[in-house]
Amino acid sequence: GAVVSQHPSRVICKSGTSVKIECRSLDFQATTMFWYRQFPKQSLMLMATSNEGSKATYEQGVEKDKFLINHASLTLSTLTVTSAHPEDSSFYICRGSSAGWLRAEAFFGQGTRLTVV
Amino acid sequence: SQQGEEDPQALSIQEGENATMNCSYKTSINNLQWYRQNSGRGLVHLILIRSNEREKHSGRLRVTLDTSKKSSSLLITASRAADTASYFCATVINAGGTSYGKLTFGQGTILTVHP
């Protein structure tokens, strides 16, 4: 099956620094990448949707200048948490989607647990 | 914003019993999916049911969809301790356009199966 490889799986950073999370689609072209965030014991909340070659569309309440998304190729999308603060500590997970109905459902990355100290 | 609401929020059962989780949503959908997540780890896709389907089976899983009531249920039969996890429903409203495949998740049900 199709695979989205997400790195790193865990990262601890100091407050005020930036962290980059990468998602690579290994065997399909991810025309769209969705980025989700999950706080402890809560559900997944969509942060933004990015289409290759276009600017990302952010959900209401998500700061686009803080969460920079780059989707410059069909196999790589990155999320950069800039000037991270402890409240940004969360589980971040990407999901690659490709045109074609039958392939709509199963391409999540493994997730990144970010801890800001 | 959350599309789905799930109940119960937490379910505790004994091994061998059946577990039923429900999901309700607000808008018309293209399909509804169920996912499993073990203790804050990645998501495992369980099953997808399209809006024109009423029931699907996969192993010990049975999913129903009632579009008139905007609700779905996930039944796990003969549960095992290894089924302990959080279960989420997620809906897809649009199947095309730039938001193709956008999933909106419910709040989830935490299932604990005691050996």
Image: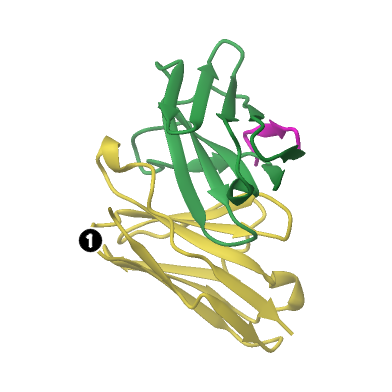
Chain colours: A yellow, B green
Pinpoint residue A36: horizontal percent, then vertical percent: 55, 57
Please give the chain letter of the residue carrying mark 1.
Answer: A
Q: Any magenta on residue B26?
A: no
Out of A66 and B105, give the one closest to the viewer.
B105
Residue drawn at x 57%, y 78% is A10
Residue A86 lies, in percent from the top left, at 75, 77
| Image quarter of residue B31 | top left
Of B78 and B32, which appears nearest the observer? B78
Q: Residue at x 55, y 40 (%)?
A: B104
Residue at screen point 34% across, 35% down: B96
Judging by the rendered image, the residue that carries numbered circle 1 is A27
Question: Horizontal placement of A95 versus B11: left or right?
Answer: left
Q: Quadrant of residue A103?
A: top left
Q: Position of residue A97 (x, y in %)?
A: 35, 50
Magenta stretch containing residue B8, yes or no? yes
State the image coordinates of residue A38 (x, y, percent, origin top left): 64, 58
Q: Residue furthest top?
A: B68
Counting labels gives 1
Q: Is residue B9 above or below residue B64?
A: below
Q: Nearer the viewer, residue B18 or A37?
A: B18
Mark 1 closeness class: few <14, some 14–19, many ≥20 residues within 10 Å? few
State the quadrant of the N terminus of chain B: top right
Q: Secondary structure at mark 1?
A: loop
Q: Amino acid at mark 1?
A: Asp
Question: What span is in magenta?
Answer: B1-9
Q: Is residue B9 above or below residue A52?
A: above
Note whether A103 is above or below A20 in the view shown.
Answer: above
